[in-house]
Amino acid sequence: GVFSDAQRAQLHRVSLSRIICDNTRITHVPPDPFTQTGHPADVLPCSHPLIPHLNLSAWRERDTDPICGSIPRLKFGFSLLCDSTLLYHCHHGYSLNGPSSIRCDHNSNQWSPAPPTCQDINECAGLPSPCPQHMECVNTPGSYTCTESDGPSSGSASSVVSAVMAAIGGVAMVVLVILCYRRFFLKRQKPMIGGCCQRKDQWNGGDHALKEGTSQ
């Protein structure tokens, strides 16, 4: 009563040669590994029909019951159908909320009692915390994570420091631009202005001398 007829038929097909092929890197085996092989022709590749695979479809559970209809499954959990009884178990990090098993009631043609659900466990709610003291516990679906804890004081202090550094950097940038402007641009313009003034004085002196020569 442990295996069905289809399951027993598949188990009879499995040989030690198939087990060797599925669990090692050996690619060629004899059909019967208990017999001595003296020629290369006695060894077959693992894909040969004489070394058949195990068909696991015989272990696939049915989705409906002939009396109670659709079989209720668990989200974030497992279910096992034994005759007319469904056994439930949740994944790690989840707790079973409801009965651990239900049966098909042949009188009402319904599953009884109502199927359970899997509820997420908040690992961070218990004491002591699963995380180290300097880290903060954050609950996640089915698990938790540990993150670096940042208190409100440290957050505000860091924001103030960032604002002060940004202001100092802005002021320093403005001062640097002004100094560069005065040092490079103004110095380049002064000789040009002086030269223009000198040329203008020379032109004025030449005109004055020309006027005196003409008058004489």
Image (cartoon, rainbow, N blue to C red):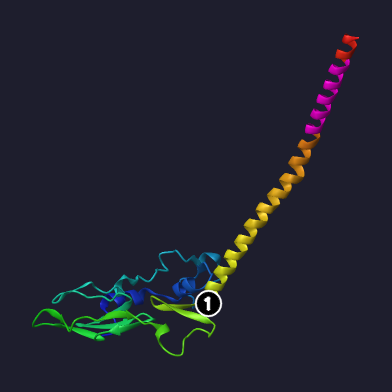
Residue 109 percent across, percent down from the top left = 11, 79
Tell which residue pokes out farthest to the bottom in this image: 127
Write the residue at 39% across / 78% down: 142
Q: Is residue 155 above or below residue 190?
A: below
How many numbered marks are there? 1
Secondary structure found at label 1? helix
Instruction: Answer yes or no: is residue 148 visible.
Output: no
**Depth check, front residue: 41 or 212:** 212
Q: Quadrant of the C terminus?
A: top right
Tell which residue pokes out farthest to the left in this image: 107
Residue 213 percent across, percent down from the top left = 90, 11
Give the left or right position of residue 43, taking residue 167 as reference. left
Q: Residues within 10 Å of mark 1 (few under 14, many from 20)?
A: few
Residue 157 percent across, percent down from the top left = 56, 73
Amino acid at pointer 1:
Ser
**Depth check, front residue: 30 or 191:** 191
Q: Is residue 197 magenta?
A: yes
Specify the principal SS of the magenta part.
helix
Instruction: Answer yes or no: is residue 180 visible.
Output: yes
Label 1 sits on residue: 153
Write the residue at 56% across / 69% down: 160
Q: Is residue 90 above or below residue 171?
A: below
Read off the magenta span: 192-209
Q: Is residue 181 magenta?
A: no
**Depth check, front residue: 63 or 60:** 63
Tell which residue pokes out farthest to the front in this image: 215
Write the residue at 49% across / 66% down: 44
**Depth check, front residue: 129 or 173:** 173
